[in-house]
Image (spheres, rainbow, N blue to C red):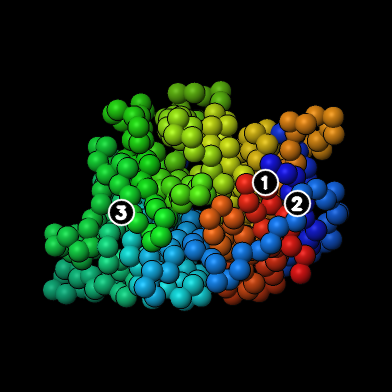
């Protein structure tokens, strides 16, 4: 992998550098009036080969890592097949996140979804798909004779709705999810209700068109290629559904929801959420010879995800962290950034800089490579305050931040940092407009 280099304006809270290689609580996030000062970043040494951007007419697959603040929402749009494109939405952020998700769907030309995946039932992942906490992307509800009736919206999926089945602790959000999914799927098989539980539906693959597929590789505390549930998998996060998007040319994109692989505190190995799910998934992918071009980092960069052996096994070229500018969790965690750095992940892209807590240690420092160490690869961390658009054609992929895509598309005083990368198996180059 060649070194990645960037010249850009960076928000004051953004970190950049070169390196050697329990449930999400409800929180308030600013949607306006955020003053973010921009400062010029130092120019990093240029190394890499020049490569041509993918011609717009050659783009086969579009991926959008949507900026929904502290939450997750990922849109996958497949190749054009007879003037139609398969659309899969994985999570929908918080209830208020529809103000970001729906404009993005419109931007991408999506008028209806084929598949919706709820990785799990935390409000910051599935809240935007139910109405208990805001306007649903998928349906509307009404009280009729004391009963809740659900009416599908145009975005309600036509092929399948995927979830991890009942969770250990059923919340009001999950209750509405269960009720409306049951009412709107109705046992007709259209759309299919795919519950990834008890090992069922692992390995289920959706054809996105052309030679692109989306495969369920984990869910319900199980991992593809293993027998039985992973030991100690007993929380909603540990039930998260993971999806691998691939093509025959060797491009792989992995999104895992809040799947974790280690306890938050290494001094408390028997703490809650300590099931080695990531390790088992990494072992399976490594055995299958899969190295991931882009990893959407699990659990927003929390300390209990991004386990070292997992990252070593899948060897991501780019890590994307969906994180809120104002979050109560200190995401992304220094431990996560250090793990990505130590495994020579060249590029860390964040939808925003996140938020440090007063109790946190100083920000993770990225050490400069020793030029005499050929195994060392530079890592650059960039926060853009916006959505990432990934265009794929064969083994090439371009990554851009979308202009005017800062949180909810309406945040005053916050501008999206515009970056543009052209990538292939040899690495990524920055495009300076």
In the picture, measured across the screen, residue 331 lies left or right of residue 378, that is left
* Mark 2 nearby-residue class (10 Å; few <14, some 14–19, many ≥20): some
Residue drawn where x is 58% and y is 37% of the image: 315
What residue is shown with label 2? 49
Residue count near mark 3 (Cα–Cα under 10 Å), binned few <14, some 14–19, many ≥20: many
* 221 versus 326 height, above or below: above
Report which residue position mark 1 lands on. Answer: 426
Q: Secondary structure at mark 1?
A: loop
The residue at 49%/62% (across/down) is: 61
Q: Report how far apart the C-alphas of labels 2 and 3 lie in the structure.
A: 41 Å
Q: Which mark is residue 107?
A: none
Q: Measure the alpha-carbon separation of dots 1 and 3.
A: 35 Å
141, 86: nearer the viewer = 86
Instruction: Report the residue at 41% width, 45% height from top.
Output: 242
Q: Position of residue 298 (x, y in %)?
A: 50, 44
Q: Nearer the viewer, mark 1 or mark 3?
A: 1
Q: Position of residue 367 (x, y in %)?
A: 79, 36
| Location of residue 302 in the rendering, given as x and y in whole percent from the top left corner | 55, 42
Between the residue at mark 2 and the residue at mark 1, the CA separation in whole angstroms equals 8 Å
Q: Which residue is located at x 56 percent, y 62 percent?
A: 391
Q: Residue 162, which numbered label?
A: 3
Q: Quadrant of residue 374?
A: top right
């Amino acid at each position: 992998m060649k070194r990645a280099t960037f010249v850009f304006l960076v928000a004051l809270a953004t970190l950049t550098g070169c390196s050697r290689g329990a449930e999400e609580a409800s929180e308030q996030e600013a949607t306006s009036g955020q003053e973010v000062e921009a400062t010029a970043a130092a120019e990093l040494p240029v190394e890499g080969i020049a490569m041509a951007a993918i011609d717009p007419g050659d783009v086969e697959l579009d991926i959008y890592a949507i900026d929904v603040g502290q939450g997750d929402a990922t849109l996958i749009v497949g190749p054009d097949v007879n003037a139609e494109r398969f659309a899969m939405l994985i999570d929908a952020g918080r209830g208020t996140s529809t103000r970001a998700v729906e404009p993005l769907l419109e931007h991408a030309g999506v008028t209806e979804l084929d598949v919706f995946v709820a990785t799990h039932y935390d409000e910051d992942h599935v809240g935007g798909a139910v109405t208990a906490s805001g306007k649903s992307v998928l349906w509307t509800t009404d009280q009729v004779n004391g009963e809740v009736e659900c009416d599908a919206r145009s975005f309600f999926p036509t092929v399948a709705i995927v979830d991890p089945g009942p969770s250990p602790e059923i919340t009001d959000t999950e209750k509405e999810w269960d009720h409306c999914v049951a009412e709107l799927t109705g046992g007709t098989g259209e759309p299919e209700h795919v519950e990834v539980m008890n090992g069922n539906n692992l390995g289920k693959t959706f054809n996105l068109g052309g030679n692109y597929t989306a495969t369920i590789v984990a869910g319900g505390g199980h991992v593809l290629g293993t027998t039985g549930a992973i030991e100690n998998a007993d929380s909603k996060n540990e039930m998260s559904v993971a999806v691998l998007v691939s093509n025959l040319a060797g491009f792989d994109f992995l999104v895992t929801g809040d799947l974790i692989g280690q306890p938050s505190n290494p001094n408390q190995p028997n703490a809650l959420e300590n099931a080695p799910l990531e390790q088992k998934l990494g072992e399976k992918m490594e055995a299958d010879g899969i190295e991931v071009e882009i990893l959407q980092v699990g659990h927003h960069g929390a300390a209990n995800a991004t386990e070292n052996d997992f990252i070593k096994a899948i060897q991501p070229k780019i890590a994307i962290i969906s994180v809120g500018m104002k979050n109560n969790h200190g995401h992304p965690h220094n431990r996560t950034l250090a793990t990505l750095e130590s495994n020579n992940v060249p590029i860390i892209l964040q939808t925003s800089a996140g938020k440090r807590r007063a109790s946190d240690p100083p920000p993770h420092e990225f050490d400069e490579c020793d030029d005499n160490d050929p195994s060392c690869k530079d890592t650059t961390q960039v926060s853009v305050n916006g959505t990432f658009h990934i265009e794929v054609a064969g083994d090439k992929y371009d990554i851009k931040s979308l202009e005017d895509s800062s949180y909810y598309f309406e945040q005053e005083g916050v501008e999206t940092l515009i970056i543009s990368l052209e990538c292939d198996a040899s690495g990524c180059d920055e495009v300076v407009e």
